[in-house]
Amino acid sequence: MNNIELINKLYETSSLSIDEYEYLIINRDEESTKLLKKYAVEKRQQHYSNKVFVRGLIEVSNICKNDCYYCGIRKSNHNCDRYRLTKEEILECCNEGYSLGFRTFVLQGGEDGIFTDPWLCDLIESIKQSHPDCAITLSLGERSKESYQKLFDSGADRYLLRHETADSKHYSQLHPDNLSLENRLQCLKNLKEIGFQTGCGFMVGSPYQTTRNIAQDLKFIKEFSPDMCGVGPFIPHKDTMFNNYASGDADLCCYLLSIIRLIKPNILLPATTALGTVENNGRERGILSGANVIMPNLSPMSVRKKYALYDGKISTGEESAQSLYKLKQSMNAIGYEVVVDRGDINNNL
Ligand code: SAH
């Protein structure tokens, strides 16, 4: 089958083999990009019309016990100016976000020892008490199943844990020996079993990534069937061993967003900050390729620059209200509407 035939097969069956995904990526051209985009937008439209869901991202801590080779807040980066937000600061971010219209808060951070179960459960309960109509998403890395269960029981709704790569050899090229793909996948399985709306994902263009690896990631997404999937370009950070690598390709990233939309038509798919960082209007392009979520930064201005996973992150110098205003304008300009909504996955169709 040629590319166009494969795209039609994906559109109709929402599934391809690893070999077919690989072929589709290798033979990416203008015609296939255009067709994929058209199909992806059509499917996204069926489930979510022209709505764009926003999630207020609160970067709760850049203290991390892990040493992921690609990440700017890795433990061994001694140039990183460390911080953690207090409970009061986080609640303040939520209050500000709520008044701006956010109905999902994403608490993301390094694996900071302060995040014990009692500390997090108390925080989650406090947020839910003030804002019972909001969803809480956590993105705090790997924890035990018992711990995830407690967080869920306290009221957390969703958990983002990118699988990073579905190939264990590639995983070991990106992480030190104490971190394994096996454990990462076990965590994802546990999250799903507990009942979290669960998100996986990977970086496009991470060091050593092959086309085959990306095809494996797509197959994994099909099999795992996550509620959310974060896919953004890798961007080097100056204080990591990957500082000389190039950033991931925005065109390929958008192409993959379209493919993922066809693999799971009702998936919640963000146009990531990293995509907006590698290219002006990257997030708009992501939406036009089939994404339907954007995660503006709600962190206090004083810490935004410090939460540097990679160099050059956008909107570190802009008030939340202003960046939301601009985002609404730019979405309206391409025919989309930023809505005030929890934006849960639509399982009705
Ligand atoms: N500690 C949490 C949150 C990690 S940060 C966890 O382990 O899940 C969220 C995501 O940012 C990571 O999963 C990774 O895919 C992405 N990321 C980290 N460094 C990056 C870089 N240099 N370029 C692009 N994305 C990066």
Image (cartoon, grey):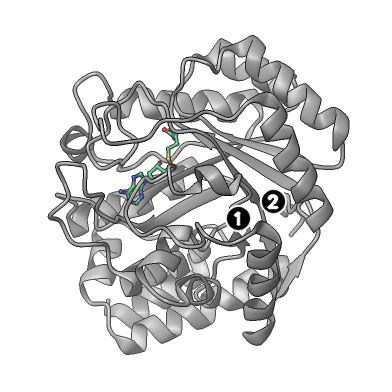
Say the numbered circle drawn on residue 193.
none
Q: Which residue corresponds to the image point at 60% horizontal and 57% vertical from the top-left? A: 296
Where, quadrant-wise, is the N terminus in this rendering? bottom left
C-alpha separation, residue under disc 1 versus residue under disc 2: 6 Å
Residue reaching furthest to the bottom: 31
Name the amino acid type tagged 2: Ile
Residue 258 percent across, percent down from the top left: 46, 70
The residue that mark 2 highlights is 345
Give the quarter the ligand 1 occupies. Answer: top left
The residue that mark 1 highlights is 268
Apparent side of residue 236 relative to residue 149 in the rendered image (left or right): left
Q: Which residue corresponds to the image point at 42% horizontal and 27% vertical from the top-left? A: 63
- As helix, strand or loop, the secondary structure at mark 2 comes to loop
Residue 57 percent across, percent down from the top left: 60, 47
CA neighbours of label 1 inside 10 A, class few (<14), some (14 to 19), many (20+): many
- As helix, strand or loop, the secondary structure at mark 1 comes to loop
Between residue 48 and residue 43, name the one nearer to us: 48
Apparent side of residue 74 relative to residue 259 in the rendered image (left or right): left
| Residue 156 in sight from this viewpoint | no
Pointer 1 or 2: first along the chain: 1
**Discs 1, 2 touching: Cβ within 8 Å:** yes
Where, quadrant-wise, is the C terminus in this rendering? bottom right
Residue 76 percent across, percent down from the top left: 24, 27
Residue reaching furthest to the front: 302
CA neighbours of label 2 inside 10 A, class few (<14), some (14 to 19), many (20+): some
Between residue 41 and residue 90, name the one nearer to us: 90
Between residue 66 and residue 312, name the one nearer to us: 312
| Residue 322 in sight from this viewpoint | yes
Q: Which residue corresponds to the image point at 20% horizontal and 26% vertical from the top-left? A: 176
